[in-house]
Amino acid sequence: MSTNKHFIYDDDQCKFVPVNYGKSERYLHTFSIWFVSSVVFACIGLAALSQNVGSPAELALKAENSVLTNQLEHTKTSIITLEEQLDGIADMDNEMYRSVLGMEPIPEEKREPGVGGTDIYSDYDLYSQDAAEILKWTASRIDNLERRVNVQKMSFNEIQNYYNQNQERLKHIPAIRPLEGILLSGFGMRVHPVFKYKRMHDGIDFRADIGTHLFATGDGVVKYASRNGNYGNLLIIDHGFGFETRYAHLSGYADGVRVGSEVKRGDLVAYSGNTGLTNGPHLHYEVYRDGEAIDPLNYLFADVTPEEYLMYQEIAKNTLSSMD
């Protein structure tokens, strides 16, 4: 039987008889079969592609969502950085501004106010799980930042009001750096560079070449200006209101600075040096309140930024020895 022929069953003859098509009919028949098959397979392919990949519109939407998700991830990093900066401002507010002024610090729970019991971000559940999670995280952290900023603004308003009412007293508080210099060592237990054992370091050490200008950190009266044992040449300024500052290892005193001299904040009072028991030229600076040595870092608030304060804290924490 020829494979090039087609047969049909003839009921009258009770047998299969060949069907003779013309050349054009054969071409039309073959084309029809191929066309129908192509359409069927194309539909099947498009259906499979749509099911597993998505339509062009869906692909564009997925690409857009991917870009937005990446942007939100970048935003998370920015939010975390802002939170760290706000933490630094809050530390300065409590440990420097409010502490120095004698105001009560703001407790942590007040700086981190709650938002209620219900899920206020449930509207984001309409999106995919990944998108919903990052949207909820971002929204909640931004809301928290706004609340913390509002608390901080209220605190600064209180400090400003307190300052306006106590300007005379605040002129005498040691509130600026005694020089422009890098911190070398902090307040607290430190290894002495000469004795080689740990002892209380009652002040902070600044890097300073011999002859560096040193300034009064608050209004006051010179109480002492002479040699004093391991301190070397020492200057003590009585600021009143229980405050006193000490400048040690000096190379000399400014003109006119002697016991009983009145000084104003920012006045040149002495020059740094290497006198006394030291490990090199520097300024050793102390702050006393009611006869007790306290951390001078908390009394640099008038000219130290939050970033500088955090840097000083880090140096003080990681430096285990002192210069004197």
Image (cartoon, grey):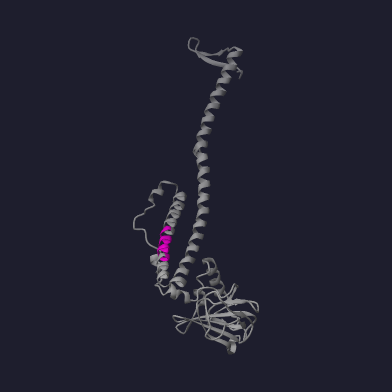
Image side of residue 68 versus residue 110, left or right: right
In the image, is residue 236 above or below residue 106?
below
Picture coordinates of residue 256, whole percent (x, y): 58, 82
Image side of residue 14 versus residue 207, left or right: left
Quadrant into which the C terminus falls: bottom right
Residue at image position (65%, 77%) is 209
Picture coordinates of residue 300, whole percent (x, y): 51, 73
Query: Looking at this view, is 3 or 244 the one in front?
Result: 244
Residue at image position (57%, 23%) is 34
Whether residue 83 appears in this view of the structure is yes
Query: Farthest residue in the bottom direction?
Result: 229
In the image, is residue 232 above or below residue 90?
below
Q: Would you say the magenta stretch is mainly helix, strand or loop?
A: helix
Q: Is residue 92 magenta?
A: no
In the image, is residue 256 above or below residue 141?
below
- What residue range appears in magenta? 146-156
Whether residue 321 appears in this view of the structure is no
Query: Looking at this view, is 319 or 23 the one in front?
Result: 319
Q: Quadrant of residue 150?
A: bottom left
Query: Looking at this view, is 204 or 225 the one in front?
Result: 225
